[in-house]
Amino acid sequence: MWNVETAETPVANMVEEAVPTRFVTHHLERDDLTGKGDLLTFFKNNPDFDLKATRLDCYLKAKPDALADVTDAEGTKARVRAKQRLYNLAPRYVQTSPRRLG
């Protein structure tokens, strides 16, 4: 059975595979987690950042202003890295969503 609320549908999976960062950004808006505002700001201000394929340190070296609008740069870097690690272990956002785990 498909679960639209948790985005467990074949179409959602295809969208997540095609544009993982945009998918995560959309779903982060509904989640309650520490640093959510800064994560959303980072992802929205850096649409070319690919959560699955881009190394954060290389990205920040090439774009030193990428964290300009976040309030906690170090915390945001740690959270982005954590999201990337989670995506390597569980490649679906729904598998690691605070709404599902909470």
Image: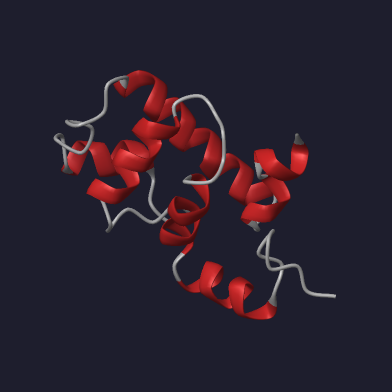
The residue that appears at 39% across and 56% down in the rendered structure is 50
27 relative to 59 in the view: left or right = right
How did the renderer colour the structure?
secondary structure
Q: Residue furthest right?
A: 1
The residue that appears at 58% across and 41% down in the rendered structure is 85
x and y, in percent, of residue 13 in the image: 62, 72
Q: Nearer the viewer, residue 76 or 1?
A: 1
Q: Nearer the viewer, residue 73 or 4?
A: 4
Quadrant occupied by the C terminus: top right
The residue that appears at 50% across and 53% down in the rendered structure is 24
x and y, in percent, of residue 30 in the image: 53, 46
Quadrant occupied by the N terminus: bottom right
Above or below, comparing residue 7 to residue 64 in the picture: below
5 relative to 30 in the view: left or right = right
7 relative to 51 in the view: left or right = right
x and y, in percent, of residue 23 in the image: 48, 61
Above or below, comparing residue 13 to residue 59 in the picture: below
x and y, in percent, of residue 49 in the image: 32, 53
The residue that appears at 48% across and 30% down in the rendered structure is 79
Q: How many marks?
A: 0
